[in-house]
Amino acid sequence: DAGVTQSPTHLIKTRGQHVTLRCSPISGHKSVSWYQQVLGQGPQFIFQYYEKEERGRGNFPDRFSARQFPNYSSELNVNALLLGDSALYLCASSLVGTDNEQFFGPGTRLTVL
Amino acid sequence: LAKTTQPISMDSYEGQEVNITCSHNNIATNDYITWYQQFPSQGPRFIIQGYKTKVTNEVASLFIPADRKSSTLSLPRVSLSDTAVYYCLASFTGGGNKLTFGTGTQLKVEL
């Protein structure tokens, strides 16, 4: 079975631009969460979606938004990119919306110049 | 959310048992202890989860004393491939998928 997939794997943007990151969960998983991981730190929670509804939001500015589609895939959008947005963006899926066992994808490495 | 404290780094040799201790003095009644492993440029991978006493699976054991203020992840007979960052989390099962990661423990295994 395929694991969580994310695209693209790497991305380079400049300040002020917009970016869209994509995630496909494990088949049958209905919950998708997004995390940001800055170098040297642990992942920080951004959003959780379950059954296409937002169920949780971390301490991130409104420049960050996300959505989940009927097939349970998800997009993370970041507007007006800042240098500090450079990070590894991780997507995780789980069967339901209350699992501590989450399955992470390989991440998208975003570099903002 | 309960704050967890774990060593920044640990060194070991192949074939040894490694024990990583995590402190969580303010753990809530509904919190479970969950450990994740992360290799460079990869997403974290779930290792083990427990509530009290001892849990064992094919890769690790988790020891949680009765007061639940700390826990110990035990990796038997480590190999070079166990070199990774290990995160201890105190997470409420049922409260959504918000996992709160700290800075983790960098385990380095040498020959």
Image (cartoon, coloured by chain):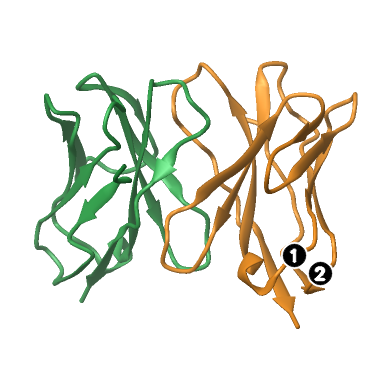
The Cα–Cα distance between marks 1 and 2, rounded to whole angstroms, is 5 Å
Q: Are the numbered discs 1 and 2 placed on the same chain, yes or no?
A: yes
Q: Quadrant of residue A52?
A: top left
Above or below, B42 against B6 in this view is: below
N-terminal of the pair, mark 1 or mark 2, is 2
Farthest-out residue, right = B66
Give left or right: position of B44 versus A1. right
The residue carrying pointer 1 sits among few (fewer than 14), some (14 to 19) or many (20 or more) residues within 10 Å by Cα, namely: many
Query: Where in the figure is residue B36, as x and y percent of width and height?
Result: 58, 47
Query: Where in the figure is residue B107, as x and y percent of width and height?
Result: 70, 67
- Amino acid carrying label 2: it is Gly
Dot 2: element: loop
- Amino acid carrying label 1: it is Val
Residue at screen point 49% across, 52% down: B44
Residue designated by label 1? B78
As rendered, which of A62 and B30 lies closer to the eye?
B30
Q: Quadrant of residue A61?
A: top left
Q: Chain of mark 2?
A: B
Residue at screen point 60% across, 29% down: B91
**Which tint is chain B?**
orange
**Which tint is chain A?**
green
Image marks 1 and 2: residues in contact by CB distance under 8 Å: yes
Q: Quadrant of the N terminus of chain A?
A: top left
Dot 1: element: loop
Give left or right: position of A87 versus A77. right
Above or below, A67 against A51 in this view is: below
Above or below, B87 against A30 in this view is: below
Query: Where in the figure is residue B8, as x and y percent of width and height?
Result: 72, 64
Q: Chain of mark 1?
A: B
In the drawing, what numbered circle is on residue B15?
Answer: 2
As rendered, which of B65 and B82 lies closer to the eye?
B82
